[in-house]
Image (spheres, rainbow, N blue to C red):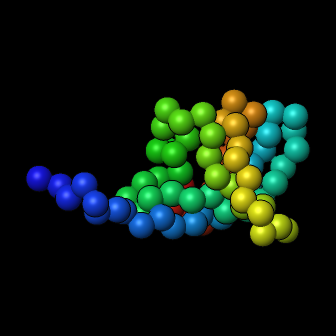
Amino acid sequence: MSDPGRRIPKITVEVELTLSDGSRQRGMIFISATQRVSDLLNAPEPYFAFRPSDDRDVLLINKSAVAMVKPLDQRG
């Protein structure tokens, strides 16, 4: 039986987003340590957190506005 108070830590993965308008943005997404980028994108939640490389603010990105996500490290 799992402990309901136990949490899996989040890690950051550097990615390049291509949005539906063709614009590109590099930054970090946050996934569980046991998750892949594709798992995050296929999850039912319509948004995911993204921190652009050139900013400290975290944005919520609507998955429907994303054309492609390219992981820039090996966790993809």
At x 55% / y 41%, what residue is drawn? Answer: 41
- Answer with left or right where residue 5 lies relative to residue 29: left
Q: Position of residue 36 (x, y in %)?
A: 47, 53
- Answer with left or right where residue 1 lies relative to residue 24: left
Residues 24 and 55: in front is 55
Residue 12 versus residue 44 in the image, above or below: below
> Is residue 1 something one can see in this rendering?
yes
- Answer with left or right where residue 35 lies relative to residue 62: left
Examine the image and state in which quarter residue 14 appears: bottom right
Residues 8 and 42: in front is 8
At x 48% / y 64%, what residue is drawn? Answer: 10
Residue 21 versus residue 30 in the image, above or below: above
Q: Position of residue 16 (x, y in %)?
A: 73, 55
Q: Position of residue 12 (x, y in %)?
A: 57, 66
Q: Position of residue 50 (x, y in %)?
A: 69, 55
At x 66% / y 36%, what residue is drawn? Answer: 63
> Is residue 67 something one can see in this rendering?
no
For the C terminus, which image quadrant? Answer: bottom right
- Answer with left or right where residue 30 lies relative to residue 61: left
At x 71% / y 44%, what residue is drawn? Answer: 61
**Outermost residue toward the front?**
5
Examine the image and state in which quarter residue 8 appears: bottom left
Residue 39 versus residue 26 in the image, above or below: above
